Amino acid sequence: MAFTSAATAPGLVHEDQVAAAIDLVRTYGSGEGAVAALRGVSASFTRGQFTAIMGPSGSGKSTLLHCLAGLDTVTSGRVLIGEVDLTRLSRTRLTKLRRDRLGFVFQSFNLLPMLTAEENIRLTGRLAGRRADPEWFGTLVDALGLRERLGHRPAEMSGGQQQRVAVARALLTRPEVLFADEPTGNLDSRSGAEVLGFLRTAVDAYRQTVIMVTHDPAAAAHADRVLFLADGHLVDELAAPTTEAVHAVMRRMEG
Ligand SMILES: Nc1ncnc2c1ncn2[C@@H]1O[C@H](COP(=O)(O)OP(=O)(O)OP(=O)(O)O)[C@@H](O)[C@H]1O
């Protein structure tokens, strides 16, 4: 592996752990106007597990996801992807690690408008200089119901179809972790349920690891566990969540 030993942390890794936050602190700004978005969050993420992150608005959900995914810097603490501590990597190595080992799905799809669905799906792999496995490409396209849409540009597709293209793009490189930030936030409930159903399949059938931020208890209920943030702290965790159980924790938190 091309990473220096200074960026590895073998003592903090357990066998099936793919990612971890260790005492993460993220403060925006300084002095009187400083905002403490994360105040010491630790969490471990296991291979083949689907985790949802919930909490009231402003509790630090997106900040946690972005720090875990190497899209934001941390004030202190560590972020492990496998054995690599992201917080110690140079910008170039971080960019390469994100491209080679992580996948991202955002609320706003983030497809390139001039490219077809197929070109969008293949884009990340091409940037990484890798030829996509044709069988895996076919599996994703069929499982996501995109076979008939491959020649369409984003403007010619519904929101749900665009998000399914974004999911295929993120999974084509078989990332170690798929990060999803409100992936159903711009979708109607039926399209949202299709995307969530596929994320569930990606975990169950293909042993992908998914970490998703959501506001929606029904979306969180697709996960294996839910982490709850409040005011920059991890305050609760729910295994095998149901929509009702997630609602109950949120109601309690919002008091
Ligand atoms: N770039 C930034 N600069 C300054 N403050 C920020 C920045 N990003 C986030 N914050 C602040 O950090 C806190 C946590 O924000 P974050 O977006 O992580 O919360 P969230 O739980 O994802 O919220 P929401 O559910 O509303 O999206 C908030 O008080 C927010 O205003």
Image: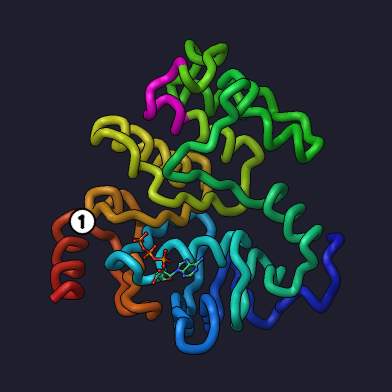
Q: Position of residue 67 (x, y in %)?
A: 56, 66
Please say which color scheme the image uses: rainbow
Instruction: From the viewer's side, name the closer residue of 214 and 143.
Output: 214
Residue 145 appears in which quarter of the rendering? top left
Residue shown at 30%/65% (left/top)? Answer: 57
> Would residue 234 be found to the left or right of residue 6 on screen?
left
Q: Please, what is the dominant secondary structure of the magenta stretch? A: helix
Viewer can see residue 18: no
Q: Residue at x 48, y 82 (%)?
A: 34
Residues 175 and 182: in front is 182
SS at mark 1? loop
Q: Residue at x 52, y 81 (%)?
A: 25
* 105 up-or-down from 144: above or below: below
Q: Quadrant of residue 224?
A: bottom left
Compared with residue 128, is residue 134 higher up or lower down, i.e. above or below?
Answer: above
The percent position of residue 117, horizontal first and vertical second, equals 56, 21
**Which residue lies under the disc numbered 1?**
242
Q: Amino acid type of disc 1?
A: Thr
- Residue 136 lies left or right of residue 46; in this view the side is right
> Which region is colored magenta?
156-164
Residue drawn at 49 percent across, 62 percent down: 65
Name the quarter showing ligand 1.
Answer: bottom left
